[in-house]
Image: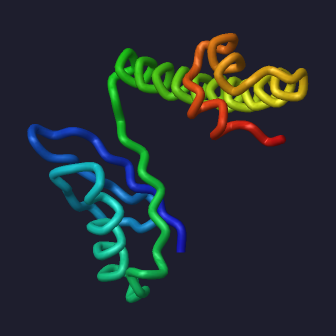
Amino acid sequence: MKVTARAVRSGAWWAIEVPEVPGVFTQAKRLDQVAGVVADAVATMTGADAADIEVQLVPAMRPEVQRDVDEAIRLRREAEEARASATEQLARAVDDVLREGLTVRDAALLLGISPQRVSQVART
């Protein structure tokens, strides 16, 4: 069973409503506790097994806070993609310069990395 946990900050707690199951309201101190308390509450109300309940968390944030969160996530994803791309390009460059006959130390100096890193990423 899939349910949505709509969480709204209320003082030091998160007040949680589950629209798919009328009458299910609960609370949690932290967002990482929401799935557990919601699964337990839904199981109590419906008789389902808590382990079979999949909870999608939807925390309500002020629009400006949500925009900042969304932008941080987007930028982090882009950075991870750029890091993966840079790692792949570095491996290609290491392979190319080593095939040209450069020593590991020369390759390291040329690429601005340590000789140990050259040896780690070399695929040839």
For this view, does 40 lie left or right of residue 54? left
The reply, left or right, for residue 7 in relation to residue 19 is left
Say which quarter of the image contains residue 67.
Answer: top left
Picture layout, residue 41 above or below residue 34: below
The percent coordinates of residue 76 (x first, y second) are: 52, 26
Q: Looking at the image, which residue is at 66% across and 37% down?
A: 119
Residue 108 appears at what percent x and percent y?
64, 20
Q: Which residue is found at the position 35% from the left and 20% from the top?
A: 65
Colour pattern: rainbow
Dividing the picture into quadrants, the one containing residue 8 is: top left
Give the residue at x 48% y 81%.
Answer: 52
Q: Where is the C terminus found, in terms of image quarters? A: top right
Camera-side residue: 59 or 87? Answer: 87
Q: Which percent across, then down, holds residue 78?
A: 62, 24
Image: 40 above or below 4? below
**For this rendering, which residue is in front, 44 or 79?**
79
* Residue drawn at (38%, 49%) of the image: 6
Residue with the most extreme left position: 12
Between 96 and 50, the one lying in front of the other is: 96
Let me know if residue 10 appears in the view: yes
> Compared with residue 78, is residue 24 higher up or lower down, i.e. above or below?
below
Residue 87, quarter of picture: top right
Q: Residue furthest right?
A: 100
Q: Which percent across, then down, holds residue 26?
A: 23, 61
| Callout count | 0
> In the image, 59: left or right of 73?
left
Asked if one can make out residue 23 in the rendered structure from this viewpoint, the answer is no
